[in-house]
Amino acid sequence: MKKQQDQHSFAKHKQNSRTRKPMGAKAENVISVALLLIGSFLIAISFNLFLVPLGIASGGVSGISILVQHEWDITPAYTQWALNIPLFLLGLWLLGKKFALKTALGSFLLPLLVLFTSHWHAPTDNAMLASIYGGIGVGAGLGLVFRGKASTGGLDLAAQLLHRFTGIRLGLAVACFDGAVIAAAGILIAPENALYALVGLFVTSKTIDFVQTGLATSRVAFIISDKPMEITNVVLHDLDRGLTKLDGHGGYTGEARSVLMVVVGQNEVSKLKSLVRSADPYAFVIISETAEVLGEGFKLP
């Protein structure tokens, strides 16, 4: 389909268009390591404060370490170090040295932080609260680590591999690998613990996606109108958004007509509808939610 004007071209030619300088490799590495450190700390304290005391094995190598502690009374940090070694070698083989360096740091750092915070006392003995807040903390930590394009090792690395090669969302990838651990918790500890672990896993998955995509949500609107130029003018100049014109044809009449595609922020939807209505009261408008938008005026790629 021919594009008569796209959003990127409009953004580039605005007089007040902002210029971006690409971030240097050193700055990216510093941010990545910082996110890894912060994320690992969040995971460690959430693990020790909420999950370990109540035996909530909500998946991953951390969940396996809780099962091992329950069965053989081995400190979770030692189990995590032991399991991370072969998974790290797998990541080194499949993802290369650059990713493996970050994984090596995470694989060593997280169990170390778990060991250092193991004496922290649990703030609650309510299993439901522990599963919810533990899931939030672990999910927030993993989301930060993933945003830094790193890994804490373990089954999180396996989730990264699945995401990299299949495109499956990270939250869903983590959930797939954690299911077996939760099933084992139901057998070795108690079925009730497995149910609480499922709650924690669900919260973790949603929190990871939330950290990845953020609070801001965008909408994409498809507008079919007999007055495409009038709508184009109000969108470009009154809404100050770019748009894309697509060539379409009526399904019944076969007549050619323009389809306008506009991406706006959630707070701009009402104004867009009002402007379209003023330009053409008979316009057909479809507005749907988008998970993520990258580019001028939205998130940076």
Image (cartoon, rainbow, N blue to C red):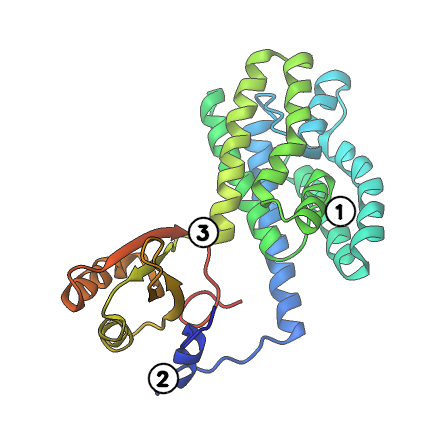
Horizontal arrangement in the rendering, residue 87 relative to residue 292 (left or right) = right
Numbered disc 3: secondary structure: loop
Determine whether 297 is above or below 122 in the image: below
- Percent across and percent down for residue 166 are 67, 47
Which amino acid is tagged 1? Phe
Labels 2 & 1 near each other (Cβ < 8 A): no
- Percent across and percent down for residue 12 are 43, 82
Horizontal arrangement in the rendering, residue 41 relative to residue 279 (left or right) = right
Q: Is residue 125 visible to the viewer in this orientation of the structure?
A: no
> What residue is shown with label 3?
291
Q: What is the tally of numbered marks visible in this picture?
A: 3
Residue depth check, mark 2 versus mark 1: number of the one nearer the observer: 2
Category of crowding for the residue at label 2, using alpha-carbon neighbours closer than 10 angstroms: few (below 14), some (14–19), many (at least 20): few
Q: Distance between the residues labelled 2 and 1?
A: 49 Å
> What residue is shown with label 2?
14
Numbered disc 1: secondary structure: helix
Viewer-nearest residue: 42 or 174: 174
Q: Which badge, 2 or 1, is on the more N-terminal residue? A: 2
